[in-house]
Amino acid sequence: MALDELELDLPPAFEMEEKVRLRKLIRNDGTFPGREVGEVLAKKGDIGYVIGIGTYLQSYYIYAVHFINSGFIIGCRKKELEVID
């Protein structure tokens, strides 16, 4: 079993209102309304705040991150984010 499949056995990696930085480019995969599929939603290095924590497929956490520059709220995985001290 992959480590991602065990993610929900641990507490969330990020807390509500925690400041985070995006580790990779995020494009619309078709789940972001009002934007074209493939359109860039957030760039590597963009900064935001965790405003919600949910789960997906009973396998891993999804963090709703409000990105300051764009104003977008985007669902991100743990591996896509890093904490800013």
Image (spheres, rainbow, N blue to C red):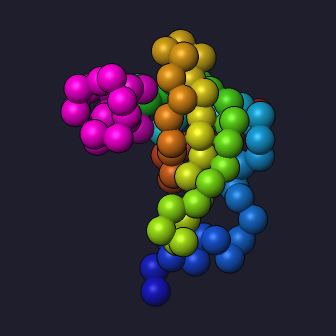
In the picture, the quarter occupied by the C terminus is: top right
Vertical position of residue 49 compared to residue 57: above or below: above
Residue 76, image x, y percentages: 51, 45
- Res. 21 in view: no
Q: Is residue 81 left or right of residue 40?
A: right
Residue 23, image x, y percentages: 48, 39
Rendered image quadrant of residue 12? bottom right
Vertical position of residue 25 compared to residue 79: above or below: above
What main secondary structure does the magenta stretch of the protein show? loop
Residue shown at 36%/30% (left/top)? Answer: 33
- Does the magenta portion include 53? no
Rendered image quadrant of residue 29? top left
Residue that protrudes farthest toward the front in the picture:
33
Residue that protrudes farthest toward the top in the picture:
69
Residue 31, image x, y percentages: 35, 41
> Closest to the observer: 31 or 82?
31
> Closest to the observer: 57 or 60?
57
- Does the magenta portion include 35? yes
Residue shown at 68%/76% (left/top)? Answer: 9
Residue 17, image x, y percentages: 77, 34
Residue that protrudes farthest toward the left in the picture:
37
Residue shown at 60%/70% (left/top)? Answer: 7
Q: Which residues are magenta?
A: 24-42
Q: Is residue 5 left or right of residue 25?
A: right
Residue that protrudes farthest toward the bottom in the picture:
1
- Res. 65 in view: yes
